[in-house]
Amino acid sequence: MPATRPHLDRDTKRNEILDAGEELLLRDGYEATAMAAIARRGGVANAAVYWYFPSKDDVLAAVLKRRQERALATAPDAATTSLDERVIALLEQLDEVANLTAAVHERASHSAAVAEVHRGFHAAAEGFLQTEFRAAGLRAGDARRAAAAVMAVVEGIHLHERERDPAARNELVLWTLHRLLAAAAPKDSPARS
């Protein structure tokens, strides 16, 4: 039907621009990626790209949101993989966007779109970890704090160790995770909530 054709063309073109933005942002980083380059790679005029994405922050947010949705859709199944395997899979997903980590933190204070995606990432990752800590026996408050601690370790590594060794990073994150899980083991004194 002719009435729906422009809508389909717009969605197709938006996805092409998003693909271009993702490629350039991941390859070159946020600062080095210009909207004009995204427009050129996406096959639209420089000014036309703004019809689809009002700013580079909106491109960044859309790229990160799409990657997060894909990561969640392809996350390892808890029934067939260990917690360690699922955490490593999450870390590998983060490695793919590692050169954008600092930009996300910086841009989140200036862009509602980036801030929303960043909050969504934290909610999903911390929710996953809290569920695992609760299943291991931590009370709700301790599970929340343990999840926040693991996320602080992960983000600290991603922000400050650009030339990180993934194996060393995995070892540190899993060591932290295991120590926090050990806190769920029965002790003489009750756990805090």
Image: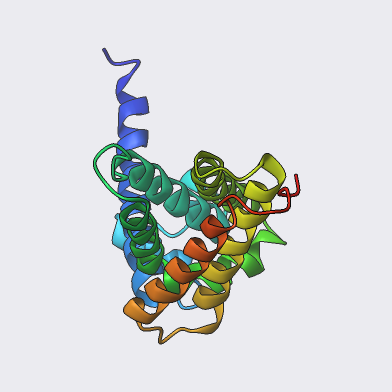
* Residue at the image position 26 percent from the left and 12 percent from the top: 1
Residue at 56 percent of width and 41 percent of height: 134
The residue lying toward the viewer, choosing from 81 and 116, is 81
Look at the picture and state if 45 lies above or below 32.
above
Residue 23 placement, left or right of 32: left
Question: Which quarter of the picture shows residue 107?
Answer: bottom right
Q: Is residue 61 visible?
A: yes
Question: How many numbered discs sit on the rendered protein?
Answer: 0
Horizontal and vertical percent for residue 61? 52, 52
Residue 85 x %, y % = 31, 56
Question: Quick check: 109 left or right of 18?
Answer: right
Residue 150, compared with residue 122, is above or below; it is below
Which residue does the image show at 35% across and 52% down from the upper left? 86
Quadrant in the picture for the C terminus: top right
Residue 33 visible in the displayed image: no
Q: Is residue 87 left or right of residue 186?
A: left
Name the image colouring.
Answer: rainbow
Is 78 displayed left or right of 60 in the figure? left
Residue found at the far front of this picture: 188
* Residue closest to the far top: 1
Q: Residue 119 at what x, y percent from top left? A: 62, 49
Q: Nearer the viewer, residue 139 or 160?
A: 139
Residue 164 pos. (x, y %): 40, 83
Residue at image position (56%, 42%) is 137
Q: Is 128 or 5 nearer to us in this picture?
A: 128
Residue 119 in the image: above or below residue 104: above
